Image (cartoon, grey):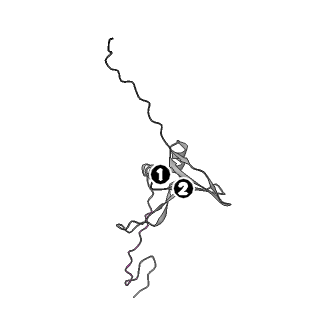
Amino acid sequence: MPLTTGHAHAPHDRRPARLVSRTRPAAPDTARIISDPSTPVFVTVHADGRRRYGYWRPHDPVTGQGSCYVALPTEECDSLHAAGRITLGEPVVDPSRTTYRVRAARTPARPLRAVPGPVLAA
């Protein structure tokens, strides 16, 4: 039997092959992921200024995917931050990096409009 390279499993190995998605979430998906309270998102700012936004994707037994960290597009997250749509929490400082919790910014409620109604005479 010829030898092959790659991540293929041996024929006797019953584990499913792990698929790695090379696609990144689009901007609306990025905002949705950040605004989901059950998905904690963090940004790590390294000493050289490099930033990495990401979250932990739990294992999904139905699809067999997950149990890994997922990076979010830095440019899109920076744009959301510049637009005021996301905020950064308190920093956790290490010698080589600082980590912040990323949350969706709270949007103020719209003011109530007065609804014209009939004027009652006294």
Is residue 35 within the magenta segment? no
Q: Which of marks 1 and 2 is nearer the N terminus?
A: 1
Q: Please state which amino acid type lies under the numbered disc 1.
A: Ile
Task: Determine which quarter of the picture holds residue 121.
Answer: top left
Dot 2 corresponds to which residue?
A: 42
Q: Please state which amino acid type lies under the numbered disc 2.
A: Phe
In the image, residue 82 above or below residue 112: below
**Image quarter (top left, top right, bottom left or bottom right) of the C terminus:** top left
In the image, residue 106 above or below residue 20: above
Q: Position of residue 56 (x, y in %)?
A: 48, 61
Q: Give the crowd class for mark 1: few <14, some 14-19, many >=20 residues within 10 Å.
A: many
Residue drawn at x 45%, y 36% as measured from the top left: 109
**Image quarter (top left, top right, bottom left or bottom right) of the N terminus:** bottom left
User: Is 28 placed left or right of 117 in the picture?
Assistant: right
Q: Position of residue 17 (x, y in %)?
A: 40, 74
User: Is 47 placed left or right of 105 in the picture?
Assistant: right
Is residue 18 within the magenta segment? yes
Q: Which residue is more in the foreground, 59 or 116?
A: 116
Q: Position of residue 32 (x, y in %)?
A: 43, 50
Q: Where is residue 76 in the image (x, y as percent from the top left)?
A: 50, 50
Q: Which residue is more in the foreground, 8 or 68?
A: 68
Per the rendering, the mark at residue 34 is 1
Q: Main secondary structure of the magenta part?
A: loop
Q: How far apart are marks 1 and 2 (CA)?
A: 9 Å
In the image, residue 30 above or below residue 96: above
Q: Give the crowd class for mark 2: few <14, some 14-19, many >=20 residues within 10 Å.
A: many
Residue drawn at x 53%, y 42% as measured from the top left: 84
Which span is picked out in magenta? 9-22
Task: Determine which quarter of the picture holds residue 43.
Answer: bottom right
